[in-house]
Amino acid sequence: MSSLSLEDLDRLFFGLRPAFTKQDDLTAHSLVVFLDIVRDLLPAAGAEPQQEAVFRVQKPILSSDLVGFFSKIEVLLDEEQQAGALINPWSLADLRFNEVRTGAVLAGLWSESFGGRASRAFLTHYLSSALPGTCADWRVELELGYRVRKEFCPLGGLAERVDIVIETKRFLVGIEVKINAPLGERQLERYQEELGRHARVCGKSAHVVLLSRKSFSPVPGVPCLTWKDLAASARASCGSRAQDRGFAAQLIARFGDHVYNL
């Protein structure tokens, strides 16, 4: 029987850990705690070997515990694989860091014509996080009807194209999607001006939100949420139990998993 080195175990635990953070239940939490404790026992990569190791754990881990753990984990992983839970369709779609394609998918997932209540719940969570003081209840606002536009030109020209615009009964919300590309000169300010003019004509209130990898907005009045924030909204809107999700909710949750690492 071949043996595993400490480096092999460390890589194994590091690779397994994300599979059990997708469901916020007792079993998943217990596994995460267990994996964290075991990883703390392993030396850092490249560390010099020491004659005496110092372990800081509250309870020793017995070899029988490890045997039982691996026996159970093999069954769980097989069940997850057979159910397709270890496959992320958005990774297979090769979105990677493509802003245009990722933004187009996001706009589609937010559209009520795609997932009905699931799409509306996803958008509700996101707008509630991005613009909490703008609307008393985004859920109620969206239930009155909304539409999602991609590459929207507020005044009809091609000079200013906002990546995603959410139009409700009372609001116009522009979402500027950024992954690697930098902002253009006064880009957010220009969007504020253009959306503002269009909103005044429609008798609505305009707002711009930046969606990027960093939680920093260079323009006052333009909130910035990260892709991790978006992932949190996707997961929260779908519930913690994968088996309780419908098809649309599954795709939304997996999109959250995909963009979490952008």
Image (tube, rainbow, N blue to C red):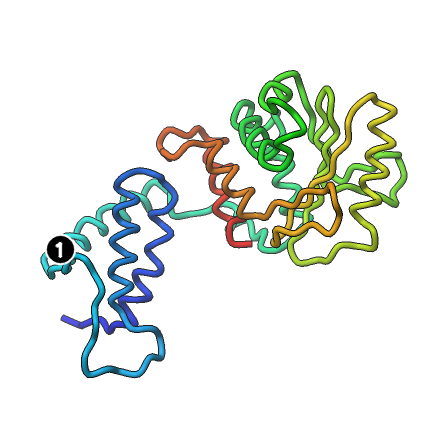
Question: Residue 187: x, y in percent?
Answer: 81, 49
Q: Look at 21% across and 61% down and name the residue there.
A: 57
Question: Residue 128: x, y in percent?
Answer: 59, 31
Q: Residues within 10 Å of mark 1 (few under 14, many from 20)?
A: few
Q: To which quarter of the image does residue 2 belong?
A: bottom left
Q: Which residue is mark 1?
A: 65
Q: To which quarter of the image does residue 200 belong?
A: top right
| Residue type indicated by callout 1 | Asp
Q: Quadrant of the N terminus?
A: bottom left
Q: Is residue 199 left or right of residue 178?
A: right
Question: Residue 140: x, y in percent?
Answer: 60, 18
Count the numbered circles shown: 1
Relative depth, front residue between 228 and 255: 228
Q: Is residue 43 left or right of residue 222?
A: left
- Helix, strand or loop under label 1: helix
Q: Is residue 143 left or right of residue 32?
A: right
Q: Look at 47% across and 46% down and name the residue there.
A: 257
Q: Quadrant of the C terminus?
A: bottom right
Q: Look at 82% across and 35% down and name the residue there.
A: 195
Question: Residue 90: x, y in percent?
Answer: 52, 46
Q: Look at 26% across and 42% down and name the residue there.
A: 27
* Rendered position, 156 above or below 75: above
For this orientation, the residue located farthest to the top is 144
